[in-house]
Amino acid sequence: MQIQLSDHFTLNKLLKFVLPSIIMMIFTSIYGVVDGLFVSNFVGRTAFAAINLVMPLLMGLSAIGFMIGTGGSAIVAKTLGENEPEKANEYFSFLVYATLIGGLLFSLSGFFFVKPLVTALGAEGELLNNCVLYARISFASLTFFMLQNVFQSFFVTAEKPKLGLFVIIAAGVTNMILDFLFIAVLNFGLAGAALATVCGECIGGLIPIFYFSRNNSSKLKLGKTHFNLKILIKTCTNGSSELMTNLSSSIVNSIYNYQLMKFAGENGVAAYGTIMYVNFIFIAIFLGYSIGSAPIISFHYGAKNDNELKNLFKKSISLIGSWGIMLFVIAQLIAGPLAKLFVGYNADLFLMTKHGFQIFCFAFLINGFNIFGSSFFTALNNGLISAAISFLRTLVFQLSVVLILPMILGINGIWISVAIAELLTLCVTVTCLIRKRKVYHYI
């Protein structure tokens, strides 16, 4: 029997419902990693460093899709919980169309402005040319990537998380097969990696449009709507934490790369790129859980079901704590093999990557609570607190520590910066959860 948002969620039912979203996020991270793996081993260190320099820009722009998806799905799920399905579909349609138009505008702008941006980060010569090549090809599919991010949340709201997983798998498999074909077989080099990504993202954005445009068995369907500035502002406000997370991460990652270029040159950027790829996969568990559980929280908040909110909050905290310990242990064990997989061709780079990851992974003990805390307030339609947590976590604290700690600890200060920033954010997250418990009744 299909699990519905209105159900009471036992631990088993909760895991069943969120599992497709978790797998979806892990798979999304894995097929992003495959680009780096093929480029690093078949094209070279400079091309690999180029992807890592330009990736924060691409991810920052695509974050608009996450903002609209998470912020909009909270509104749509709450509206469904208030038993207004027609209004929910009107909101859903408007937000998808707004993403489509916005994506086209950002894609064109990015194509023309990428060169001065990466030049400002210190890229020059062959590294600069590789950055511009990869980014300009990737901008061709930015609109579809944004739509893919939007639909990841709305598939869950539509009670079709498995279908969302299928879409991501289709996009990911396409990307990985074409990576092998374009890079390893046809020797297209860095351009091949970008083309493979474009093809995968087009599939990820187009399949959901075809599904929701037709009559389907879900709660949502694309149809007629009208411009609704109030809902757009509310969506952006409510989802601003997700936008802030990704934009701040893009800015901070650029600063990390700048600091690493200063302390360790291209080797430092390549090592950090490897660590970030693994980090994407690990935190995908927390991100996937947050995406999968948010519509349930929004629905029961809209239905004023306080007992179920308490149930969901308690189970969520227990799961995230357990997963954090598990990921930390796994990270310590696999630091060496993973470094060898990506950069084993260079002994110095291998040692730097392994050492850096063993320090960096302390962040996994903490960051799940902050990711869920921000998502939890988004689901409760409190975008202000959610954005504050994300803003402090991904920009203020990380930016501060990555600029200060390297002056004291050298390159080790860069590796430990994320964990310190997460610890500072945890204090804020816990404070917000305690202060708002009587407002939302989740404790």
Image (cartoon, helix red, strand yellow):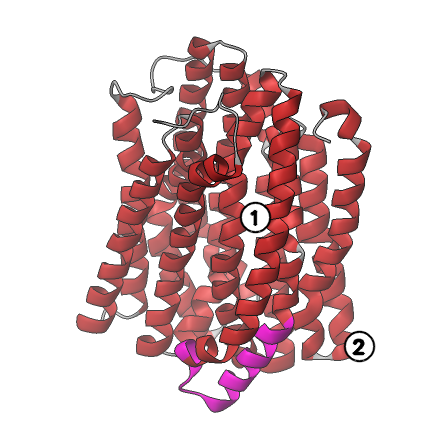
Give the spatial CA distance, label 2 vs label 1.
Answer: 28 Å
* Quarter assignment of residue 36: bottom left
Q: Earlier in the sequence, mark 2 or mark 1?
A: 1
Residue at 72% across / 79% down in the picture?
Answer: 410
Q: Is residue 350 magenta?
A: yes
Of residue 401 and residue 380, the one placed in the foreground of this image is: 380
333 sits left or right of 359 in the view: left
Residue at 64% across / 63% down in the picture?
Answer: 255
Circle 1 packing at 10 Å, graded few (<14), some (14-19), many (20+), is many
28 sits left or right of 262 in the view: left
303 up-or-down from 40: above or below: above
Residue 357 placed where, x, y %? Answer: 57, 73
320 sits left or right of 124 in the view: right
Q: Secondary structure at mark 2?
A: helix
Residue 126: in sight, yes or no?
Answer: no
Circle 2: residue type: Ile
Residue at 58% across / 47% down in the picture?
Answer: 319
**Start-end of magenta stretch:** 341-359
Q: Which mark is residue 408?
A: 2
Q: Which mark is residue 246?
A: 1
Circle 1: residue type: Asn
* Quarter assignment of residue 308: top right
Residue at 52% across / 80% down in the picture?
Answer: 267
Residue 155 placed where, x, y %? Answer: 39, 32
Q: Is residue 249 magenta?
A: no
Residue 361 placed where, x, y %? Answer: 61, 67
Residue 405 placed where, x, y %? Answer: 76, 71
Q: How many marks?
A: 2
